[in-house]
Image (cartoon, rainbow, N blue to C red):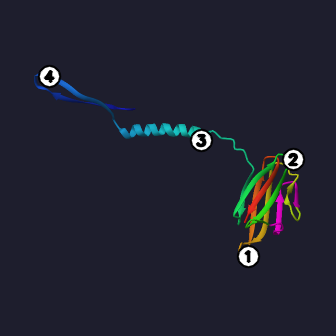
Amino acid sequence: MKTLYTFAIIVLTGVAGIQTVAAQTYPANPAATAQDSTTAGTQKASKKTKEKKETKKRTRVVMSSEVLRTSMVKRSDISPNKVEVVIKQAGRVINNPNDLQMVGSNGTVVNLSNYIGFENMELPFDGYVRFRAQNLMNNSVYERQVRFVVTDPGQWVLRIEL
C-alpha cells in the first residue's frame, strides 16, 4: 500500500490574498518504492533464466596439460571422418613422441612414421592423446596430454604446440 503526502508552500502577499508557490507529492517511504521496483526487476530476470537454452556440443579441445597451445582445425568435409594429430616443438614436427598413447571412443588408431591420428570414427568422438616430451632446453621430460571432442563430420587436424 502506497501512502502519498502532498505538501504545499503558501506565501501570504498582503492584500492580494493567498498564493500557492509550489505543490509536490512525495511517497510515504522512498525506500519501499525502490524495493518494489527492484523486486519486479528480479522477477522478470528470474523468468528469463528459467528458460533453458539448448547448447550444441561442438568440436573442441576439452583439456590440455603441459602444452603451450592446442587447436582443432577442419581440413575438409570429405568422409571418412578422421583426425590427424600434429605435434610441434619450436616449429619442428615431432613424428615419434616418447610413450605415445592414443585412445578413442571408436574408430582406428593410426601411428605411422609420418602420420599420427584416428580414422573411421563415428560421431560423436572422444579422443585422448598422451605422450612424453622434453622441454626446449632438453634437460627435463614432461608428460603431456590432450583430450578433445569431435561432433561435426569431416577431416580434422589437432595441432599441439609444445
Query: Could you tell me the amino acid type at mark 3?
Result: Thr
**Badge 2 vs badge 3, beta-carbon distance below 8 Å:** no
Mark nearest the camera among 4 and 2 is: 2
- Kind of element beneath mark 3: helix
Please report the residue visible at 76 percent of the width from the left and 56 percent of the height from the top: 148
In magenta, the rendered stretch is 94-110
- Kind of element beneath mark 4: loop
Query: Where does residue 9 sit, x and y in percent of width and height?
Result: 22, 30
- Kind of element beneath mark 1: loop
- Kind of element beneath mark 2: loop
* In front of the other: 45 or 60: 60
- Disc 2: which residue: 79
- Disc 3: which residue: 49
**Badge 4 vs badge 3, beta-carbon distance below 8 Å:** no
Query: Could you tell me the amino acid type at mark 4?
Result: Gly
Query: Could you tell me the amino acid type at mark 2?
Result: Ser
Q: Looking at the image, is 17 positioned above or below residue 145?
A: above
- Disc 1: which residue: 138
Going from N to C along the chain, the mark reached first, 2 or 3, is 3
Query: Could you tell me the amino acid type at mark 1?
Result: Asn
Q: Residues within 10 Å of mark 1 (few under 14, many from 20)?
A: few
Going from N to C along the chain, the mark reached first, 4 or 3, is 4
Between marks 4 and 2, how big is the CA–CA gap? Answer: 96 Å
Please report the residue visible at 78 percent of the width from the left and 63 percent of the height from the top: 87
Say if the magenta span includes residue 95. yes
Extreme residue in the front direction = 91
